[in-house]
Amino acid sequence: QSALTQSASVSGSPGQSIAISCTGTSSDVGGYNYVSWYQQHPGKAPKLMIYDVSNRPSGVSNRFSGSKSGNTASLTISGLQAEDEADYYCSSYTSSSTWVFGGGTKLTVL
Amino acid sequence: EVQLVESGGGLVQPGGSLRVSCAASGFTFSSYWMSWVRQAPGKGLEWVANIKGDEKHYVDSLKGRFSISRDNAKNSLYLQMNSLRVEDTAVYYCTRRLPGTSSRDYWGQGALVTVSS
């Protein structure tokens, strides 16, 4: 049950697009379409942004999109806004019937 | 309105025990997988355990020390934590998951558990 691999930080200017990657194995990310993404602002509970690789919950901006190729999933945020600055975590179901999170990526909006 | 409200956090000495609870409302509690996710200070999220009916799963590193349970009649989720260690210090979040999806769509505000002498 090793954590999924995410880059520690990413940055972008307002209006730009950025992508955050999440790399696992064939026993988690690559084996199931059960990847989700969460946004967390300081001192707050995480908020679901994407589930089942590419589905957006009601109320989440369409600037957020998800995809997967092989053992790597990605979250893309287009038209960056100041309020997007937060920590982002990916999560996947695993072959052990458990769940695993990525280490988190800190997004800075310049 | 869906609400998940944790309680029972606090300060406990190493080796001690603590039970955190989660009161759920606004949905049919028994129909959902429920989970505990924790976050150590300044660290990332860690999935701890989940439960639906009699089916339970745990992260390997906590098996044998932590136990998840639920009371569907009381719409409540519990996490019994034994033999606590300093590294178990974290905010413990209660979450619900839509069946058949990876959608962990509602989270509680979290309960802070501090293990220290």
Image (tube, rainbow, N blue to C red):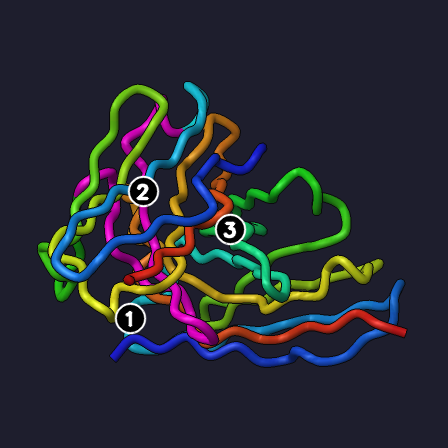
Give the dominant element type of the magenta stretch: helix, strand or loop: loop
Mark 1 highlights which residue?
A: B27
Mark 3 highlights which residue?
A: B50
User: Is A46 inside the magenta-drawn segment?
Assistant: yes
Indicate which label's residue lies in the foreground, 2 or 1. Answer: 2
Viewer-nearest residue: A96 or A48? A48
Q: Position of residue B113 (x, y in %)?
A: 68, 72
Which residue type carries mark 2? Ile
- Mark 3 surroundings within 10 Å by alpha-carbon count, few (fewer than 14), some (14 through 19), many (20 or more): many
Q: Position of residue A99 (x, y in %)?
A: 48, 41
Query: What's the residue at 23%, 69% (across, down)?
Result: A82
Q: Secondary structure at mark 2?
A: strand
Q: Position of residue A61 (x, y in %)?
A: 12, 61
Mark found first going from the N terminus, 3 or 1? 1
Q: Chain letter for mark 1, please.
A: B
Please determine if labels 2 and 1 lie on a single subunit. no
Q: Chain letter for mark 2, please.
A: A
Query: What's the residue at 29%, 51% (across, down)?
Result: B103
Viewer-nearest residue: A7 or B74? A7
What separation in Å lies between label 2 and label 1 (alpha carbons)? 33 Å
What separation in Å lies between label 3 and label 1 (alpha carbons)? 18 Å
Query: What's the residue at 70%, 54% (across, down)?
Result: B66
What residue span does the magenta drawing correspond to? A29-54
Q: Chain letter for mark 3, please.
A: B
Mark 2 highlights which residue?
A: A20
Which residue type carries mark 3? Asn
Viewer-nearest residue: B69 or A72? A72
- Mark 1 surroundings within 10 Å by alpha-carbon count, few (fewer than 14), some (14 through 19), many (20 or more): few
